[in-house]
Image (spheres, grey):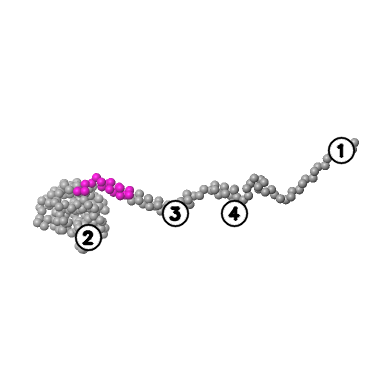
Amino acid sequence: MGPRNRPKKAAPTRSSGVKPSKASTGVPPRTPNQPSTAKTMISASQPKSMASRRPKWLWLVIVIVMLIVLVGGGLYYYFRSNSGQDASTFGEYVPDEGRTHVAEGSAIAYKANPPASGPHYPSPEPWGIYTNTIAQGYWVHNLEHGGIAVLYDCPNGCQSVIDQLEQAFKTFPRDKYGEVKLVGTPYSGLPNHAQAAAIAWDYRLIMNTFDVSKVLAFYNAHVDRGPEDIP
């Protein structure tokens, strides 16, 4: 038997070399300036940092708010700590004039009358009640040590005030060093012709008429609260 006549296979057609258009594949054509979809997805998946997304002015607002909170908190604490004090015995605040030591006997010009801080002599006056006038440069140093100075202005004399001060010096509470930090001295020229004034560091209580109970309340509020915690 001769070989069977097998049908010839059709020769494979050659590609024309033209790639199918994207329109024929269902993919829309990409414009020249349009990034590829893959690249767009990659860049979108990379999160930006919080700092890069916040505008610069936002940092300024945050800083201002923090300063307001800090200052407001300090004022709140100050007024809250003094809210329970009686103004008639706690006294008024006197702006601080510093606490520089100057040569003993030198003239000192204070802004406040009477002063409640400022330059003073190197040594304080011993605690006690005096009938002779003590220079300001001495008793201002007593204030720096947390003491109380009582000034009395009596052009015609006021023995009753002196007697009450001497009794106060014997009976007022002693501080942690075992001392009554009280010094009394005559003083000429108190404001509004007042008879007496109690002075602590940065505070003063002006009294038209001397009142030992007010002096005691002022003493308890301010003793041992000077810049220097020493006898």
In terms of depth relative to the viewer, which is nearer, 54 or 151? 54
| Amino acid of disc 4 | Asn
Query: Is the magenta region chiefly helix, strand or loop?
Result: helix
| Amino acid of disc 3 | Lys
Q: Secondary structure at mark 2?
A: loop
| Front tag of 4 and 2 | 4
Left or right, 67 with respect to 213, comes to right
Sequence-first tag of 2 and 1: 1
Q: Position of residue 71 (x, y in %)?
A: 33, 51
| Front tag of 4 and 3 | 4
Q: Secondary structure at mark 3?
A: helix
Left or right, 4 with respect to 38, comes to right
- The magenta segment is 72-89
Q: Position of residue 96 (x, y in %)?
A: 26, 56
Q: Which mark is residue 56?
A: 3
Residue topped by disc 1: 4
| Front tag of 2 and 1 | 1
Residue topped by disc 4: 33
| Amino acid of disc 1 | Arg
Sequence-first tag of 2 and 3: 3
Alpha carbon separation for disc pair 1 and 3: 90 Å
Q: Which mark is residue 110?
A: 2
Residue at image position (21%, 48%) is: 87
In terms of depth relative to the viewer, which is nearer, 27 or 112? 27
Q: Can the viewer see residue 166?
A: no
Sequence-first tag of 1 and 3: 1
> Badge 2 local density, few (<14 within 10 Å), some, or many (20+)?
some
